[in-house]
Image (cartoon, rainbow, N blue to C red):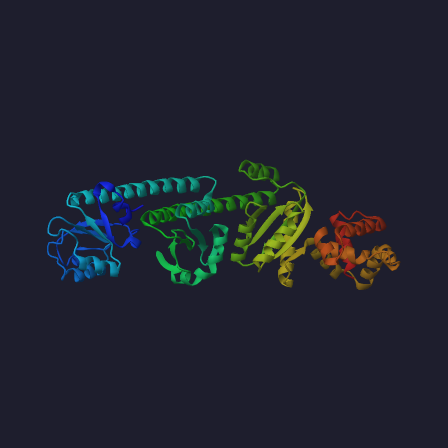
Amino acid sequence: MALTLAGLAAERPLGLRVLTGEDVLDRPIGWVHPTELTEPQAFLEGGELLLTTGLALDETTSPAYVRRLVDAGVAGLGFGVGLSHESVPRSLVATAASVGLPVLEVPRKTPFIAITRAVSRAVAADEYAATVRVGRAQQELTRTAVGQGGPAGVLRRLAKLVDGWVLLFDRTTVTEAAPASARAYGPSLREELERLRTGTRVFALDGQEVVLQTLDTSARRVLAVGASLDTAGRHIVNTAVSVLSLALEQDRAQAAARQALRTGLLELLAGGQAELALRVLAATGGEPPRAPWSVLVFLGPPAARRKLLDALEGEVFAARSGASVAVVGAGTVVDAVAEAALRIGGLHGGVAGPVSAAGFAAGLEQAELAARAAEAEGKILVSAAEHTGRGLLSLIEPVVAQAFAHGVLAPLRRHDETGRGDLVESLRCWLEHHGHWDVAAARLGVHRHTLRNRITKAQELLGRDLDSPGVRAELWVALQT
């Protein structure tokens, strides 16, 4: 922390006495400059403690001299007494008090060099402290980036190091925030982000300094820092920019490698090499999904497919399959994947299964056909059973189809006529939602236990196993007539 006028005045060996400006002694001293010039402005940068014995000053010239020092932005004036002046000129003190310039009286016994040394020691100590601070910050940011923290950890560490908030943008979208509440600043920065092409932009937001800095990455990433940054703070931000750029590019490269690996594993599965594919997946840190599997295929624009892969990263097995995204997992993943696709928008999917490892290739083909049907009809998801049922129905004569449906569904309709439940509609909704209890129950407006009881009753009346894909397909055909 820079030495202030108050700190200098408190050093008793110097014997300094404060004559004016007691309320602004918190001003930091940038340097010390002794001079007897009456117009020293050309040699000043601002923030100096000016030292003089007043050799060329008197009661008449002192007021104008003080005003020139204020215009030059000096931190304060040290006036040495006992040489050309026994005391500081009264007009100088009065003018300094009126314009807010601190004046320190320097006794005859205190040489100006002693004051210069005191300030030099403080400046050197500040520079050393700043160097140590920057060095430690660089180590912390680097350890965080190469450890488990990753880019998000770097942002959290940076926010603490600069005592502020930090945002990471992908174009104008906030991808990371530290602390989490800092996301609220995102919309306010959009206009400035659109103006920034590359490099750094500094501006004020609600009275706080904000720094925008582009990262050296293949995608357009921008770091935003809201904090009062000193020189060390700016060095720390620059370090964070470099570390983040490397970490993000490394993550991108690793993600691309993982995607390529999963695409290769998908091809092995489709080629009948399930055992090898699952062994490789386990060896590379993945958790192989347990068969039987649900297989989903999504079609859509490239950007939407990329977003879906990003959204499913680390959650389920998802891979590129030509111009589509294929997802493999237990039946429970269907709802979660469909919700992710719905949030992203522009995607149409098909689902097949459950399938065994040996039947994966057929399941993948069925899911692709169902996805094309969903795309043609503008739906988010179509099951292979539903799509297959439609195809079979088109091949059956209407009279035959109606007779088939009447015969298959007769037990359920007779039950419903007694008023003891709505088995036909419950079965239709359950099949339409691929056997997912919560979704179908919510659509029907009943509790999931009620729906389970209805489906159990339907299975008893039909005398058929509703877990069988073939039975479900036949029932779906019957329900469409």
Instruction: Answer yes or no: is residue 185 visible.
Output: yes
In this picture, is 62 found above or below 469? below
Q: Position of residue 431 (x, y in %)?
A: 74, 54
* 83 sits left or right of 5 in the view: left
In this figure, what is the number of numbered marks? Answer: 0
Classify the position of the N terminus by image quarter: top left
Q: Position of residue 337 (x, y in %)?
A: 61, 51
Please identify the quadrant where the C terminus is shown: bottom right
In screen coordinates, is 341 left or right of 104?
right
Residue 321 in view here: no
Q: Residue at x 78, y 56 (%)?
A: 426
Picture quarter containing residue 197?
Answer: bottom left
Task: Determine the image quadrant of residue 12.
Answer: top left
Q: Nearer the viewer, residue 285 or 273?
A: 285
> Camera-side residue: 178 or 363?
178
Q: Quadrant of residue 381?
A: bottom right
* Residue at the (22%, 42%) spot, across then down: 118
Q: Seen in the image, is 13 located left or right of residue 354?
A: left
229 or 149, which lies in front? 229
Asked if 145 appears above or below 68 in the picture, the reply is: above
Q: Is residue 344 left or right of residue 128?
A: right
Q: Position of residue 100 (x, y in %)?
A: 26, 58
Q: Nearer the viewer, residue 121 or 367?
A: 121
**Looking at the image, is 250 positioned above or below residue 410?**
above
